[in-house]
Each structure stands twice: as C-alpha cells, then as structure tokens.
Amino acid sequence: MGNVIGIDLGTTNSCVSVVENGKAVIIPSDTGSRTTPSVVAFSKDGERYVGDTARRQLVVNPDRTISSIKRQMGTNWSMKIDGSLYKPQTISAYILMKLKQDAEKYLGQTVNDAVITVPAYFNDTQRQATKDAGAIAGLNVLRIINEPTSAAMSYGLDHGDSKKVMVFDLGGGTFDVSIIDIADGIIEVMATSGDNHLGGDDFDERIADWIAEQFRQEHRIDLRKDFAARQRIREAAEQAKKELSSATTAQINLPYIAKDRSGPLHLDLTFTRDKLNELIGDLIGRTEAPVVNALADAGISASKLDMVLLVGGSTRVPAVKDKVKKLTGKEPSQNINPDECVAMGAAILGSTLTGNALISRGTGQSLMLFDVTPLSLSIETMGGVATRLIERNTTIPFKYTKEFTTASPMQTTIEVNVLQGERPMAHDNKTIGKFMMHGIRRSNSGMPRINVTFDIDANGILKVSAQDLTTGKMQSVTITASDRMSDTEIEQARRDAEMYSATDGIRKDGLALTDECRRLILDTDNRLKEQKKQMYKAKYREIKKDVSELERLTSKFRADKVTAQDVDAMRQAKERLEASAGSIGA
C-alpha cells in the first residue's frame, strides 16, 4: 500500500499531510501555501477553479463561486450552474481532488488512500456525505476521524506522558470540544460536544454587518444589497479580524465601493479590538455550554485538566483565548499549530491503519486511538418511547443487541423506527431511518422474540438489523445520508433536552405508571371473574368502581400533554385499587 494522506476538510481552509520518515509533514499547495481555501468557482467558459484562484472569484464572479460548503454537508442544499446541479458532496469532492493532486505532485506518485477529518459533532448524515465526497474525489477513505481527536493524535505523538486534555476546536464554521485521556500511547476520547454552526464565518458576518451599517448611516446606501460590494466587505472583515489578533486597531479601506450622484464613494473606517469583542461576545459565549457538557459527560472538573489545546484558526482571536482561560482556569497551550495539527493527526492515523504505527515519544509505545459517538441512538417502542441502544459518548466501534417483542396479538410485521437525539419520547427526536420486518409468525402479543442490533463502525456510521429468533428471518438497513438529521436539528435536539428535561421526566414516569396500571387492571379483572361468586356484592362493586376510575385515568393519558398532577392522580387511583383488590380471595 502506498502513502496515506491525512486531510482536514475545513469550512474556510483545508490542509493535507503525509507521514515521512516517521513524522507528519504538511504538503504545500501548488502556490506554496500550507493551506488551501475551501472555495470552488466556475468560469463562464466552463472552467473550474479550486483554492486560491477560486477565492479570487468571490468578488468578480460571486454567483458562480461557492464557499463554506462544509456547513451544507448532509443537507438538501444544491446549486445549479450551467444546467448542472451541484450538491455539497460534489463541491467538497472538488476540494479533495485538489488536495489529492497537490499530494501526488509532492510525493511523485499516485495517492489512493486517505483519512478525512470531520467535526466531532457531525451527525451520521454528514459523516456519510464526507465519505461520499472522498469517493467522488477518487479516494479510498480508510477512516473518518473527529477533528479534536485528530489534533490530540498529533499532540500525543510528541507528548506521550499521561494527561487529561481538553481540545477546544473553533474553526471557520464549526465548534467542537473534546475531553481526551492520553496515557502510554493510548488516546481515549472521554466525551465530546459542540455546535455545528459556530465559527470564524459568524465572526466575519458580524463585522461585515457593522461595516455596512456604518456606511449606510453616512451615505444612506446599503452595501449588503450589492453582492460584489458585500463580498469585498466580507474579505475586509476577515482581514481586520486577523489583524486584531496581534494589534488593537485595524484600518478598513475600500475605495470605490459605491457611487451616488456626487460620484464614487470610498469606505474608510477604524476598527478596534474592543468593538470586535462587543460584536462577537455572544458568539464566543456560545462555546461555554458545550465545554460544560463535555466536562460533565467525562465526569471531571476543569481543575482536573492537565492541558487545554487550541485548534482552529478562530482560536487566534484574543477574546476566545480569554474565554477558554476563564472557563478552565488554565492558560491554553501553544504547543501545536492550530491550522495544521488536525491534518497531521489524520496522516498519523492513516500510517497506523496501514501497519506503520508511529511510536509515541517518551513511552516507546505505538499510538492507539479510541473515539466516541456524539449522540444517543434509539428505536421507537410501545407508547412512543425512544428506547436507547447506544448512549452518547459511547466508545466506537460498538455493537449492541436488545430483545423486543410485538405489541399486538397476531402481529406479522413490525416497523423499526431508528432515532437520534437525547429526548425520552420518540416524537421529540429525529427519525434517521425506518424499515419494516415482515413474516413474523402469528401469535399472542409478547410471544415473538425480535433481536434488534445497532452496529456503529469506527467512522460513526450506523447499521441496524432486526432478527426474528423464531423464524430466523432478518431485515437490516444502513442509515444513509438522505435519512439523517441536519446539524441544526441536532443542536435543537440538545437544547430541547436541556430545556424540557423536567417535562421529559414527567412523561417518562407517566408512561411507566400507565403500563403498571394497565397490568393491574387486567390482573384485577381476571381475579374478579374467578372469585365473583364467593365475594360480597358491596366489595365487588367497590373494586369495580376503583377499576373503572383507574381505567378512566389511563385512557385519558397523553404523553405530549401530561402534567405532574395527572401522574399523581393516576398513582393515587392505582394505590386505591391495589388496596381494595388485595382482599380478593382472602
């Protein structure tokens, strides 16, 4: 097997690396740059540009230039140019092809295999879409690896001593935080969290809006309505943001940005670091919840961290560093290059997967990696419950089987509804796939035995199967990109889980209590039929009255509308029936 390249497929910029002489090195682009802009453009004569040449088209050819495509991975986004429809996978594939070509030119040989990184909080759809993009680009994708984990892989090669590390990864379009345990050459992800729509692009948008608003107030012209002017402003905003990483003021100068009756108009503004912090303060604040969640899921406090690694170009913003220090109480480490370490870690993993494991400095051990899945996976069961088979932050690859049965007598088919999310009720989560299992042998409810298996591979891609243990028949589905939830839906699912946690607990208690009540009613009715002739009529009527009341309450139960009072009333009615029915046969 030839060289395996590691690719950081970024929102704003991408990077490619390879292992040479036991060390990961960055492969330069054809322009000599160590990163490649994640931009694709189409000229009017049909030529396709990728990287630096494409980025130059953003102003002069904006309606035929595509950037930040990573944010659309796993969605139904598409763009038609010259009669051809382009999906996110295709645009991403063009970027990957450019990186592949640069690698082949650098190595002097064909490159077939790659490890590609994705945000840790990417869902299964986005991971599959990324893998598909690699295939379109002519790459055999050996592994999809989480970006923070890849950064830790790069760090762990040169720092093998035992540490609990937080990787704070804020790039152009996504934010991830992972808690990682590095010890004896083993890199184990303890927990991960994130926000798939938070990054430098959002910072740039805030700055660009401020610039446009200053111009509008002075000249009564809204530059945001002019696509070319808007692109110039966005570029100026990004440049000013970068300058303010080392300076306290930046000058924004855009000549001939517009014109009015008096002639050409020029934009000239002084932009300060204080104004930048004001504009993006709430965006930086959004990193706090994922950090808190990741630490909680890992079961450690910030004080127990040995180190915080900053990854992604947006961590160069001073206010971001200040936020990290405030959240963790630690000065972030500067030991790795935030733009390059992710690609280098992917190259190290690629070398390991092909039997050329690198030795961790200081331990003499080859590097080993254990990653996790970011979200819980469930199936819908009776009562609309989301029954979990794989909890979030479970180490992958992972396989789990659980036995289920039918809900109705003589049932010959079941629908397996696969869910993703953290809520206990099925309708509050996202359906990511469904399939029907046919040919179940007719019998009473509760008799058939159906094994449902969730098998999630090292790429985080899920396969679900169901087998009738009586007949041996099996149905399965590999969840594909068209079935998956969007990143926005995942973020909403996590927010909903926190916001409605109290309501979820009431619903869960109500469902469990309803099942207990129905079993009690059925058992009591059967015992009444057997003992009716031996019972006093008054006692019989008392018990029947308690049965009727409990039946009334259980029939009124609606999981989506239940209150704590409803659950209490049902519990009290159950206790009354248990007390009165206890004398049957006595």
Image: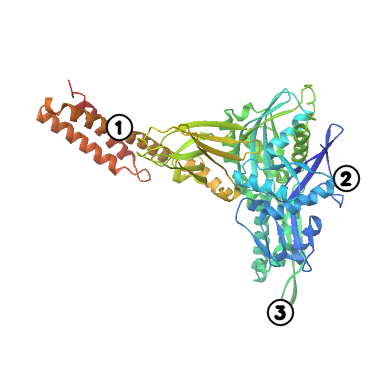
Q: Amino acid at mark 3?
A: Arg
- Left of 30 or right of it: where is 412? left
Name the amino acid, label 2.
Answer: Tyr
- Observer able to see residue 179: yes
Relative depth, front residue between 584 and 149: 584
Q: Is residue 243 visible?
A: no
Residue at the spot of label 1? 519
Give the vertical position of 478 relative to 44 (above or below): above
Mark 3, secondary structure of its residue = loop
Give the residue number, with chain letter if any, for mark 2. Answer: 106
Mark 1 to mark 2: distance in Å? 71 Å
The quadrant of the rendering that contains the N terminus is: top right
Tell me the quarter of the picture where residue 584 sits. top left
Amino acid type of the residue tagged 1 in the rendering = Arg
Secondary structure at badge 2 equals: helix
Tell me the CA gap for discs 1 and 3. Answer: 83 Å
Residue 93: percent from left, percent from top: 73, 52
Looking at the image, residue 460 sits to the left or right of residue 349; the answer is left
Comes first in the chain, label 3 or label 2: 2
Q: Distance of mark 3 from mark 2, alpha carbons?
A: 54 Å
In the image as oriented, which residue stretches furthest toward the top?
A: 586
**Residue at point 75% right, 34% down?**
349
Where is residue 517 shown, x and y percent of the image? Answer: 29, 33
Residue hosting label 3: 261
In the rendered view, tell whether residue 398 sits above or below residue 196: above
The x and y percentages for residue 139 are 75, 46
Of labels 1 and 2, earlier in sequence is: 2
Badge 1 or badge 3: first in the primary sequence: 3
Figure quadrant of the C terminus: top left
Choose between 127 and 285: the one closer to the eye: 127
The answer to which image quadrant residue 208 occupies is: bottom right
